[in-house]
Amino acid sequence: MVDPIRRALLALWYLALLAIPASAAPLDRTMFAGSLCKDGAAQVGAAEGLVRAGGDLPADDLAFAGGLLGALAERRLTCPPDGALLLESPNAAGGQDAVTGAPRPSAEARAPVLGLRQRAAVETARGVVALLTEETPAARSAGLAVLERRIATVPAAVLDRARNAETDAALKGTIAGLAQGAALSSPDPTRRRAAIAAVAASPSGAAAARLAALKGDPAYGSDPAFRAALDAGLAKVGRAVTIGDGLAILYNGLSFASILFMAAAGLAIIFGLMGVINLAQGEFIMLGAYATYGVQEVLRRFAPALLDFYLVAAIPVAFLAVALVGIVVEALILRHLYRRPLMSLLATWAVSLFLVNLVRVTVGTQNLQFAMPAYVSGGVPLYADFVVTWNRLFAIGFAAATLVLTLLILRRTPLGLDIRAVTQNRDMAACLGLPTRRVDRLAFGLGSGLAGLAGVALCPIYSVNPGMGSGFIVDSFMVVVLGGVGSLAGTLVAALGVGGANVLIEPISGAVAAKVIVLIGIILFLQRRPEGLFAVRRRR
Amino acid sequence: MTHLTRRSFVGTAALLAAPALIRPAFAADTVKLGCLFSSSGTMANIEGRLNHVVRMAADEINGRGGVNGRQIEVLTSDPASDWPLYAQVGRQMLQQEKVAALFGCWTSVSRKSVLPVVEQNDGLLFYPLHFEGDENSKNVVYVNSPPASSVLPAVDYLMGQDGVGAKRFFMIGSDYVWPRTINKQLKGYWKSKGVPESAWREEYVPFGFSNFQTLVNQVRSFASQPGGQPIVVLTVVGSSIPDFLREFANQGISATDVPILGLDMVEADLEGLDTGKLVGHLNCWAYLQAAKGERNKTFLGDWASYVKAKNVPFSADTVIDPMVSAYDSVHLWALAAAKAGSFAVPEVREAFAGLSFDDPSGYTLTMTGENNYVSRGVFIGSVNEKRGFDVLVQSADAPKPVPFSPYG
């Protein structure tokens, strides 16, 4: 029998809990700050303790802990013997005492480095703090996104408190959905089924794994309703994941194709018109990327407010700068070699070596540092596991715009007419009074300029260094030859075909074999059809 | 009259073209050291720096009066990331330039191609990269660590409680000998620890590969399968590293979801990346720029002023392990040559036994007479926001290197 006094005390305790839940167990700030300065286990303990208590802690304690954890993650928390110290920035001369906030000089002390386990715990704890204390819905929802990654470690009390306090309706719905989904192992069968439905409502590979784990649950055998709910949930998630994966393949193929197309478009014109095998095309791409870097640096110096738009501002600059380089190369070197294709091949190779080394000597060999504005960094999960990455989308859009513009130039402008005439029958065009040499020069400029544009599109995707061009030359020739020399439509189709084939084969046989298989395929195709996919009719 | 075959034509052409590959500095009563580091091709950005570090170390020694009364002359070359060319340039340096020692190679495939050349000519190659082990030539000095004292401690850390308790492994490597051997040894190691075969996946990409979308998709779907914490063991090299990291971050995977252990990842690979989303990924080397101690401060200062004085086209404030290892190599050679009182390879090799050198990492490098391996410390680094690595774990002392792996 339970002692009545103890029972009364317990009852009082519960009453107290009910009456003032928010101040039930205030955070021991000194101990919290102290733990963050101890070893990894203590740090994890402190962060996990904060997450567990997060449902009850007063808001100012949460904010205090959040500040400390943020400083720890950013290495602004040092640990001198007289207690943890918060710095404004890493290695600052002075800071505030972590507990009292009193200013103190910074002594030579250890600034703890977070290991991965600690980092995960600290991230979760910061997510809890952000969800519960941040002012703006955006910041709260960023906190929620962090918690979603490790939803199993978040206690229901935290989600309940966040939901009750939430003022933003959409966010409130998301929190409620998450809270519902967190009840997968709840003893109440109804809540459990609701949880399955909630998890299945936002399908992903991880959701599939969470649901599949429930198949081993005893209820799966004994409770038909549960079984039906789980099977339905699994089927729904499985379908969505398959669709998402299909979309991802499509997107990957399209994005690779857009890169191939950008790299090959200029070559299609140069090779098609003049039969010049321009081995410096890759270096023209590299120059376009360096021109973009130049624009970025100029904007950084003179108009920092517009820095985010450097990629747009670089479009005309890169085009014109590289077109100019192309025209100079044509006028100085290639003009004399038109009747000698082997010589022009060697000459353009020399140009490519010259350009690489020129850039290496003048700028250096390191990868260039680009600012990554929001429209080309990160991505957004669109459906199931399908993530649209902004930099790739940028390249796809860029390639589409380039295609349209180039087609317009070729089909709708006098220059385009001249280029097409010279491509089809050079001698006849000359007889009719077309200045074929000038057309050659302008076409070479146009082709080079397109390579410059490719450089702009590639900046957010690949590393930019003097050697970057060599990686493109083989692929772009492959695309141009497969597409049919001189045909832009052929180049487009070939880029889509090669890109798609690579992406389809890669998961099955690996990236190395994919390259080989695609090359063999192209060779076989060219055996059957040496003129490529789309042959431009021309008279010889 | 001899008939001009294609083969003899190519041979003559190569012979005629070859002297242009080597750039000598000056000729006097000097002792020559040769460098085999590419300044073009896919390895240029990282290998190119090592030429300058060798020069810097030689200048340092020359400033103190040289070795055995002779000044050091450094010959550099450009094998253009073309593996067979390393052997050709190496042969030329040994046979025509009569260099006392070679310093060179980054990738194991280039070392393997130089190996027969140094063995035939009884030369000495100082190899500054950590590598797959399983090789023990008396003509190569393995200045950096074999897997037992670099990769395995890092994998152990990740599998342990201090790390993430990793249970599943996605191996992505460039397709050549180093990644394949490392992964083979890792699989043997995991087997010995009772990790089931279904817990790992292995994918390879060609050199210079950059389109990592599909692979990162595969990592994500691998990560969402059940079976415990996944990690990525990354053994791609050269420009593939930053391209992989960028795609990884853009698809929204953070180090706390799936950490990457980048075995060839150095500070220089983070140049040009926004590392805010990459914080926490790991690497393991015998030196990190963030290493504590006066010797490191001095080295960083020396490099910065060398870059400024000689107008070197590399970043003055990025220093990577192979740079320090190349610097150590020159000093180790100089110590051995001074101890032997000779530049002849057999005598220098004799002198390796018992050699020790305090290097910038803070550890004391030692060599025994048993083999040409060097004891180095172990660092595990963690990517930070400032495109560098913080020292996460550091060994208490420099473990004795184990050349041959017992794990396959």
Image: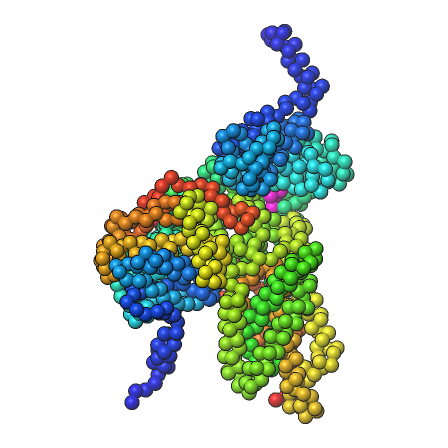
Q: Residue at x 26, y 52 (%)?
A: B352
Q: From this viewpoint, is residue A262 visible? A: no
x, y percentage for residue B172? 48, 53
Bounds of the magenta segment: A205-209
Q: Provide residue A476's location: percent of width, then percent of height.
A: 57, 71
Q: Residue at x 40, y 53 (%)?
A: B324
| Nearest to the observer: residue A253 or residue A61 | A61
Can residue A318 be seen in the rendering of this structure? yes
Tell whether position A13 is magenta.
Answer: no
Q: Position of residue B124 (x, y in %)?
A: 29, 60
* Residue at 66% in and 39% down: A143
The quadrant in which the N terminus of chain B is found is: bottom left
Position above or below: A362 against B9: above
Q: Report whether B182 appears left or right of B246.
A: left
Between B401 and A32, the one lying in front of the other is A32
Q: Main secondary structure of the magenta part?
A: helix
Above or below: residue B140 compared with residue A126: below
